[in-house]
Amino acid sequence: MRKLAFAFAGLLFLSTAVFAEEHAMAALEHANAAVVAGKAGHALTLVEHSKLALEHTLAASIVAHGVPKTHLDAAAGELQESIDHGNLEHADVATKHAVAAVEHIKASKQ
């Protein structure tokens, strides 16, 4: 019975790690796309990618722990700032926040 419990615990840990990794990868893709759009001056496209990145970042943060969770939470804050400034069509400021989010998402994967 004890071995079975350890096996299930191991599978649960592995599945949550895979879940977090998949969402972190999707968040990174969208955050990078937000940066590209922002650098091109396309604030509304930046907002759309930042929203998708935020959704994936929050999903990854739910199952993350320790330093990765701290970085994902910081990335979520940066993405929200990116969305807020992008909605005001401040592409330059929104892009800076998107760049910061990318760095936090990358740091969460190390």
Image (cartoon, rainbow, N blue to C red):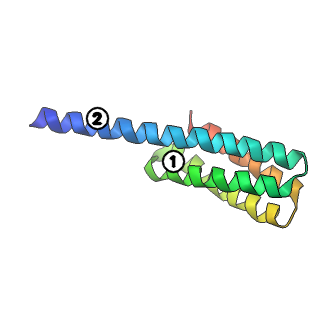
Q: Residues within 10 Å of mark 1 (few under 14, many from 20)?
A: many
The picture quadrant where one finds residue 7 is: top left
In the rendered image, residue 55, in percent from the top left (x then y), is placed at 59, 55
Judge by depth and name the residue closer to the eye, 31 or 71: 31
Q: Is residue 27 left or right of residue 90?
A: left
Which residue occupies the extreme left position in the image? 1
Label 1 residue SS: helix
Q: Tell me the residue at 88%/54% (across/down).
A: 92
Which residue occupies the extreme right position in the image? 41
The residue pinned by badge 2 equals 10
Q: Please state the total of marks drawn on the protein image.
A: 2
Judge by depth and name the residue closer to the eye, 71 or 58: 58
Task: Tell me the CA gap for discs 2 and 1.
Answer: 19 Å
Amino acid residing under circle 2: Gly
Label 2 residue SS: helix
Image quadrant occupied by the C terminus: top right
Q: Is residue 73 left or right of residue 91?
A: left
Q: Is residue 31 left or right of residue 43?
A: left
Q: Tell me the residue at 90%/46% (across/down).
A: 40
In the rendered image, residue 23, in percent from the top left (x then y), is placed at 54, 43
* Image vertical order of residue 95 relative to residue 17, above or below: below
Judge by depth and name the residue closer to the eye, 81 or 44: 44
The residue pinned by badge 1 equals 60
Image quadrant occupied by the N terminus: top left
* Image vertical order of residue 29 relative to residue 69, above or below: above
* Image vertical order of residue 21 relative to residue 58, above or below: above
Amino acid residing under circle 1: Ala
Q: Tell me the residue at 72%/51% (across/down).
A: 49
In the rendered image, residue 105, in percent from the top left (x then y), is placed at 63, 42
